Image: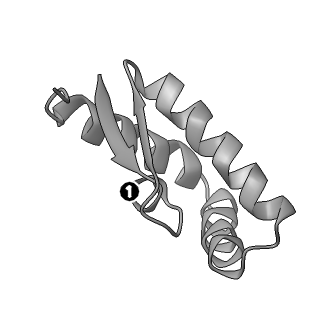
Amino acid sequence: MKTMTCKQLGGACDMEFSADTFEEIAELSKKHGMEMFQKKDTDHLKAMGEIQKLMQTPNGMQDWFENKKKEFATMPDAD
């Protein structure tokens, strides 16, 4: 199991997500992001705006996702 923070995944806080696969951790992060969006959390809304900018460039989001996936793969397993 590996752990990444909201900030490591493009978010705005230090909340930690732990999962066995990157896909699982991405889903946990997405759920957290939706909760913060509903709460209208200013810092998270700003971070979401940055991600939306990536989506405007060709392959921007795909490249970002692949880089995060590689980062996850190189992290040590949590004890």
In the rendered image, which quarter contains the N terminus? top left
Q: How is the model colour-coded? A: one colour
Residue 55, horizontal then vertical, whole percent = 67, 57
Which residue lies under the disc numbered 1?
8
Left or right of 15? Residue 50 is right
Residue 19, horizontal then vertical, whole percent = 41, 25
Residue at 35%, 45% (x, y): give it. 4
Return the residue nearer the eye: 64 or 39. Answer: 39
Residue 61, horizontal then vertical, whole percent = 57, 50
Residue at 86%, 60% (x, y): give it. 38
Residue 10, horizontal then vertical, whole percent = 49, 60
Residue 67 seen in this snapshot: no
Where is 53 relative to 70, above or below?
below
Left or right of 8? Residue 70 is left
Residue at 53%, 62% (x, y): give it. 11
Left or right of 5? Residue 51 is right
Return the residue nearer the eye: 1 or 73. Answer: 1
Residue at the extreme right of the image, as rendered: 38
Where is 52 relative to 61, above or below?
below
Quarter location, residue 54: bottom right
Where is 10 relative to 34, above or below?
below
Return the residue nearer the eye: 49 or 15. Answer: 15
Return the residue nearer the eye: 79 or 60. Answer: 79
In the rendered image, which quarter contains the C terminus? top left
Specify the amino acid type for callout 1.
Answer: Gln
Quarter location, residue 52: bottom right
Residue 33 seen in this snapshot: yes
Q: Using a 10 Å C-alpha cutoff, classify the residue at mark 1 as few (fewer than 14 neighbours), some (14 to 19) or many (20 or more).
A: some
